[in-house]
Image (spheres, helix red, strand yellow):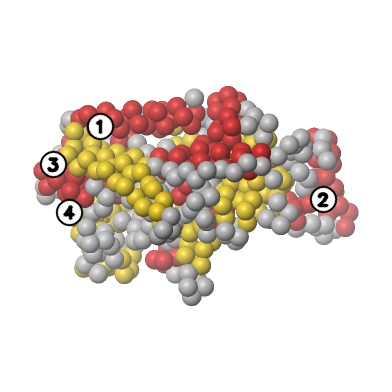
Amino acid sequence: MSISRRDLFKVAGVGILGAGLLSKPAFSAAERVVKMSAMLPSPKGNRVVICGGGWAGLTVAKYLKKEDPSIDVVLIEKRPNFFSCPISNEWLAGFVDLDFISHDYLQPASKYGYKFINTTVVAIERDKRRVYTPHGYIEYDYLVLAPGIKYNYDAWFKGDKDMTRYTKYHYPAAFIPGSEHLALKRKVWEFEGGDFVITVPPGVYRCPPAPYERAAMIAYVFKKNNVKGRVIILDPKEDIAPKGPGFRAAYEQLYLGIVEYVPKASIKEVDPVNKIIKTTAGDFKFTDANLVPPHQAGELVWMADLIAKDKEGKPTGWADQDPLTFQAKADPRVFLVGDVVGGVPYPKSGHMANSQGKIVARIIASRIKGKEHKLELPDNTCYSMVNGNPQEAIVISVTYKYDEKEKKIIPHPKVINQRSEALAKATYEWAKGMYRDLFA
Ligand SMILES: Cc1cc2nc3c(=O)[nH]c(=O)nc-3n(C[C@H](O)[C@H](O)[C@H](O)COP(=O)(O)OP(=O)(O)OC[C@H]3O[C@@H](n4cnc5c(N)ncnc54)[C@H](O)[C@@H]3O)c2cc1C
């Protein structure tokens, strides 16, 4: 049943008026949200609601409309505009301006004909097929969850919210775009000397080469600004990966005495107030830092109760998804796309999220038409800038094949560790192509 604007205000008003008459609130704030009506009139056909308008969500929205314009596609995103993590390290070094990595959500929504709703998803009821926002709920036939990652500061601070807040404000991770990136850039450009520490998260995390590329770009800025600073990378791994030889060569040939790479440095304790990090490779005092905690699937996957469990029944922190269909194992009407998934050989990258998004759009469109969808696997390409003068980059590309016998997805990587200006050019061409695909 559709509801008019007047009705909507009436519904909201009843709660407030009723509260006054009864001298105690008729509904709690949460109940008021739940009692609110549907935000959108019911569609004529199928509705797909996509939660999260990042690399994955934007791709699913556009390609669903391209596959079948009759599908009612609703994209819900909490940010008012798009800020790209890819190329943010080049922006950090001053090679591109903010316009290059910022985009508006209105152009693709109007061009491709999907609905863009700028609000936050606050609850999901899978049994009712409803997504709740502070403005009411939206019903779906299919749901796509693409909220990216969240930080797990509890691994460091065991639930101490004050310490978490202090660390976020003073040493932002800048792996989720927005203010954190702006704060990090200010810190890097205002740095006056000393040790600048970067922590590499343990296990699976967003964009495996990003901390190493970021270290190279920060070292470049220190060198350019004649700042007597060191960039210390604390890595729980035994060696740099991926593109290890390419990063190592850059650190040794371009930033000798500036970048110090410390392997096997698993974090035991972080003391942001006294600026000390205790690791299995020793204790490190820092002047300033980019403290990146462990990552997990974004909150919406937890809200929807779709987090995978390990053998002991403990949450793995990542979405429980069938990697061949992208469906939630517990609910075939829900698709999980992009960085939310762990335990597959796919890295968490914008390219991968875009590639997966196209496949998911085709799977959902086929399903709606009642057709079978032939198996498709995504691919990945990831450039890393390592030099600023001249700009030079390295690259990894990976295709995937499904081994029927082993029931396994097998990666086939190709790496170019020899840095070059041609690859730096290709980096920007790749980014422009991606932004065109998502926005133009
Ligand atoms: C420094 C850095 C450099 C990188 N460089 C590269 C690179 O060169 N190449 C590459 O391919 N990848 C790169 N990446 C990785 C890339 O940014 C991610 O893999 C990509 O963003 C994943 O896309 P996603 O859609 O899963 O998540 P996101 O892009 O994070 O999108 C998730 C969206 O969901 C929204 N959301 C979350 N919760 C809610 C809610 N409750 N309600 C409404 N909206 C919500 C968020 O606001 C966000 O917009 C880099 C990452 C970093 C940090």
The single residue placed furthest to the bottom in the displayed view is 312
Residue at mark 3: C-beta within 8 A of ligand 1:
no
Query: Which of marks 1 and 3 precedes in the sequence?
Result: 3
Q: Are marks 3 and 1 in contact (CB under 8 Å)?
A: no
For disc 3, the neighbor class at 10 Å (few under 14, some 14 to 19, many from 20) is some
Q: What's the amino acid at mark 1?
A: Ala
Residue 387, can we see it? Answer: no
Q: What's the amino acid at mark 2?
A: Gly
The image shows residue 69, relative to residue 248, as above or below, that is above
The residue that mark 3 highlights is: 254
For disc 1, the neighbor class at 10 Å (few under 14, some 14 to 19, many from 20) is many
Image coordinates of residue 175 in percent, x first then y, are 40, 48
Q: What is the spatial separation of the Cα atoms under label 3 and label 1, in whole angstroms?
A: 16 Å
Please name which of the two marks, 3 or 1, marks the residue nearer to the observer. Answer: 1
The residue that mark 4 highlights is: 260
The residue nearer to you, when weighing 30 against 407, is: 407
Q: Which numbered circle lies on residue 15?
A: 2
Q: What is the spatial separation of the Cα atoms under label 1 and label 2, in whole angstroms?
A: 58 Å
Query: Which of marks 2 and 1 precedes in the sequence?
Result: 2
The residue that mark 1 highlights is: 424
Image coordinates of residue 202 in percent, x first then y, are 34, 61
The answer to whether 166 appears left or right of 33 in the picture is: left
The residue nearer to you, when weighing 104 against 370, is: 370
Image coordinates of residue 241 in percent, x first then y, are 26, 53
The residue nearer to you, when weighing 278 against 316, is: 316
Q: Are marks 3 and 2 in contact (CB under 8 Å)?
A: no
Q: What is the spatial separation of the Cα atoms under label 1 and label 4, in whole angstroms?
A: 24 Å
Q: What is the spatial separation of the Cα atoms under label 4 and label 2, in whole angstroms?
A: 60 Å
Q: Are marks 4 and 2 in contact (CB under 8 Å)?
A: no
